[in-house]
Image (cartoon, coloured by chain):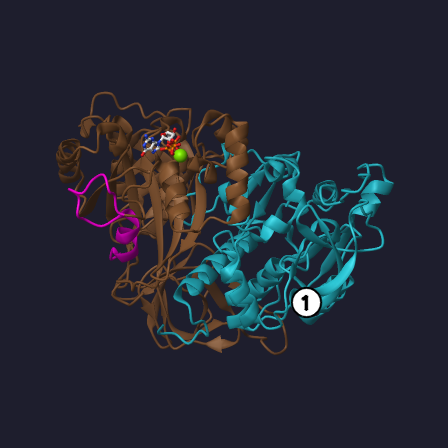
Chain colours: A brown, B cyan
Amino acid sequence: MGINGKSTNKSLLRFTTAGSVDDGKSTLIGRLLYDSKSIFEDQMEHIVQSGKRLGREELDLSLLTDGLRAEREQGITIDVAYRYFATPARKFIIADTPGHIQYTRNMVTGASTADLAVILIDARKGVLEQTIRHSYIASLLDIRHTIFCINKMDMVDWSEKVFTKIKEELGLLINKLNISDAHFIPLSAKYGDNVVDRSENMKWYNGKTFLGLIETIEIRKNKNPENQRFPVQTIIRPHTTEFHDYRGYAGRIAGGVFRPGDEITVLPSLRKSKIKSIDVLGKTLSESIAGDSVAISLEDEIDISRGDMLVASNDIPVISQDIKLMICWFNERPMKVGGKYLIRLNSNESGGIIKNISYRMNINTLEHDFENTTVNMNDIAEITIKTSKPLFFDSYKKNNITGSMIFVDEGTNETVAAGMIL
Amino acid sequence: MKNQINISDEHLKELEDEAIFVMREVAAQFEKKVLLFSGGKDSIVLVHLARKAFWPARIPFTLMHIDTGHNFEETLKFRDDLAKEFGAELIVKYVQDSIDKGRVVEELGVNASRNKAQSVTLLDAVEELQIDVAIGGGRRDEEKARAKERFFSHRNEFGQWDPKNQRPELWNIFNGRKHSGEHFRVFPISNWTELDVWQYILNENIKLPELYYTHKRKIFNRNGVYLAWAPFMQLKPNEEVFETDVRCRTIGDITCTGVTLSKADSLEEIIAEIAATRVTERGGRYDDKRSEAAMEDRKKEGYF
Ligand SMILES: Nc1nc2c(ncn2[C@@H]2O[C@H](COP(=O)(O)OP(=O)(O)OP(=O)(O)O)[C@@H](O)[C@H]2O)c(=O)[nH]1
Ligand SMILES: [Mg+2]
């Protein structure tokens, strides 16, 4: 990636599938791999045999990603499957996520690391509640590119009219959600139309095939190139004679460019120092950018521990104990005002208490519900929390890494919510 | 690439950064940490990544090998040399001991393998040494159940994986909290493909056991998979041992590791061979052929 956050075609594209249950997400991924000849012989033989055992009449390409016993028996996806594939143009990491509302947390898991969302819609059914929920989650997660696949066109006589009608329906959604880069493809995942090969049945469509689009779509990665942010993961102290005085702060750069000589401020202590060197296995780097895992050492001996952050002295993030954020709730027990959780923000940990629920999102209307603010599993809400110590952060829109957090239930240790700071 | 890291491929750099990040999270979040070292290429890459993650300090993980007793001899020497070279502590736990103690019953018959028994030895070691995290070289592209696994994969107090109820794993925030007696398996190279691993070995100039390169070996054909012959292996009546040029695509327990007919003696040739292959690397693993969900079932019991 260049410093400006633009990528070249050679880079890695991470995408996620999304959409309602049975809309054909897994079948699409299977078809994509099959028609691009990316399925190995033993994998193919395996899904043919499995299909027979399960009594499927035709080749079922969803078996390629639905790899768990329970998934195959029920014919649905339960948890994300990751698949890897490459063409001469690009490398892809695919997260095939479940459509069933019960497994929304797994959809969010797959989508949280994606640069592109592929949202499927069953042509017979049009936009459903889950279509809206997933589109909304994708926009909350700041996934900047969306491909809407109108699938199962074979079941609506390959009708352009149906496609156009759904496209219009989606137009409203896209406006409401502020999705900037949206694409639309009519296809049949089951029969392969417009997946890798152009459809003979839909001559009226002259846009790109699915593969053609994902190979060429220009991706703006959510990397923040401007604001220097370096959350410290762990301290490297060799205790050897050769490196007796070495003290390196290990971490992955979350924003900006770091160079030896840069003046930085350490949070929360607000002490200042200069970068002495940036090291990776015996090599000293002249510059490091967002995404790099490095070890940074400073000119001065300062007390720094895990959870601290090095930032540009003239560009300090928000430091506060009161945080307003959007959350996706994953737990069966509803969120409660006054409830206490453990908060993880980068490598930093803190106690947190739910102060206020501003509103709950009504997924069907995409309106804010100020009346019924009980936050149940799979709900999305705007809330305010107070933390037990001051945290330093940016808005999620500004920086996906320094602006995201998880909530952990200290009794069960479960991850109960994902939070995106406003 | 602006910085001077010697990696030509941008995507490999991204995978490396991710893996190093994960290793450091392990170092920070756990107490008693082991890196499961099999002597195979994936675990050798893990050790290399660990060195990168913590240089100039030593690797903060103990290397642990679960030894079935059915190894390629060279693997053991390679393992010991590597541990010595990087000053890492090495623990070896023997499946034979678990058998002697009556913890597992040795499989009998021609397809007998101690591969599955390793889970028992591993879980016993986890309990005995109070290990709270074991880093593994598992990759999601290897197998369909692995494709479902998180980077930080929770194990209950029986060492079991519950694939239907995994914790959400958001962004790169890893939740390694657990109750006492539970542990985690962590897979830093989850997102690497076989080809990525080989390309990385080439780019980083990582030393591998000679078994990965072409050599003469006595082998036999079992249901379409070439297996290396060893004195303790039982042959079926129709199976015949012959010697030819082979290399290992994966290295594990001899009884279930398939070999590939190959004359590739450089990393470049191996990469070309793998890029052109039509079967997955586990296509030659006998342990996965046992049933529809062999890997899922083994993993639920505590396998790597
Ligand atoms: N006729 C037709 N059937 C399709 C098409 N795509 C998928 N299907 C069928 O729709 C059913 C569901 O497909 P899946 O791929 O499992 O759906 P999914 O979206 O992955 O479902 P979840 O992951 O459980 O949310 C299967 O029976 C598929 O064969 C299509 O283009 N045409
Ligand atoms: Mg599916």
Q: Position of residue A372 (x, y in %)?
A: 24, 21
Q: How many marks?
A: 1
In the rendered structure, the residue with mark 1 lies on which chain?
B
Q: Residue at x 22, y 28 (%)?
A: A156
Of A87 and A220, the residue lying toward us: A87
Of A374 and B188, the residue lying toward us: B188
* Magenta-span inclusion, residue A202: yes
Pointer 1 local density, CA inside 10 Å: few below 14, some 14–19, many at least 20:
some
* Magenta-span inclusion, residue A274: no
Q: Is residue A36 visible?
A: yes
Q: Position of residue B69 (x, y in %)?
A: 80, 52
Position of B97 compared to A24: left or right? right
Amino acid type shown at disc 1: Pro
Magenta segment, which residues? Answer: A198-219
Position of A290 compared to B95: left or right? left
Position of A321 compared to B289: left or right? left
Residue, far top: A372
